[in-house]
Amino acid sequence: MTTTNASTATAPLRIAIAGASGRMGRMLIEAVLNSGDCALAGALDVPGSPALGQDAAAFLGRPAGVAIVSDLREGLANAQVLIDFTRPEGTMAHLQACRELGVKLVIGTTGFSEEQKAQIDEAAQEISIVMAPNMSVGVNVVMRLLDMAARALSQGYDIEIIEAHHRHKVDAPSGTALKMGEVVAAALGRDLKECAVYGREGVTGERDPSTIGFATVRGGDIIGDHTVLFAGTGERIEISHKSSSRAGYAQGSLRASRFLADKPQGLFGMEAVLGLA
């Protein structure tokens, strides 16, 4: 008689989602449920949300058995990782709860102050965190391309960054646009805080070649478009990324969650997740 030894299946990574009833929250929930190696362990929303008490996957027509709650300890009780695409004030509250409970954190929120960034860095001494202004794999590959382009086009090219998002976005320029500016500035040996120009109006005078310009568009339901323009004499180079769905952000967030699975502490960017560091 032949005896077959059943292999031990790896337990799914238990993930909680903040902002569970929002557009990004729902995309994340769907991505977790459709993955083969992750499980939905919690769903959080703000107090007073009409979604509280509902099944987190009710919008999909297939219950997940996880109710949306506002109590952080309840929502994180069974989670190993929290994915957060909310707002800075919400993320900071979630950060404190994760720190106390030992839950790892993937932060896609943008618009943090320098003080808040310092608090995140401090928390990363106790828990592991991936923080990036954009979780899209494609966007983070573009960041590497921008570094290469800026080094090669360091002389004789004016640099402008143009971004467009939906009417509901509350910060400008986008965190992704600012990160692109930081990457380009660093490659050129500049400090973005000193060379960025965020608006032009009236008689501005001739363009200072050492500056990096930003232009912001807000309207409709644009998911997220970013273009970095290197304008030279007789030619221009454009490096663009355009999102047609939030699905790319969700898949990148799952990759970040998997990356954190064996990391006890530390602050990481998507370049580390993707092996680009």
Image (cartoon, rainbow, N blue to C red):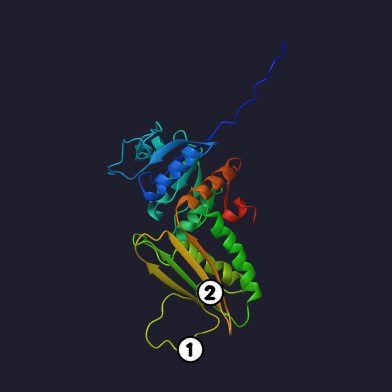
Question: What's under tag 1, amino acid-wise?
Answer: Glu
Question: Is 90 placed left or right of 196 in the picture?
Answer: left
Instruction: Choose mark 1 or mark 2, whichever is in front.
Output: 2
The quadrant holding residue 237 is bottom right
Q: Quadrant of the C terminus?
A: bottom right
Q: Is residue 62 visible?
A: yes
User: Which residue does the image show at 65% across and 53% down from the upper left?
Assistant: 275
Compared to residue 91, the image places residue 176 above or below, namely below
Compared to residue 201, the image places residue 275 above or below, namely above
Question: Is 162 placed left or right of 23 in the picture?
Answer: right
SS class, disc 2: strand
Going from the N terminus, do you reach mark 1 or mark 2 first?
A: 1
Q: Is residue 127 visible?
A: no
Q: Quadrant of the N terminus?
A: top right
User: Which residue does the image show at 47% across and 50% down from the upper left?
Assistant: 247
Where is residue 28 drawn, in percent x and y? 45, 45
Disc 1 to disc 2, C-alpha distance: 18 Å
Residue highlighted by disc 2: 229
The front one of 234 and 160 is 234
The quadrant holding residue 163 is bottom left
Question: Is 153 placed left or right of 248 in the picture?
Answer: right
Callout 1 touching callout 2 (CB < 8 Å)? no
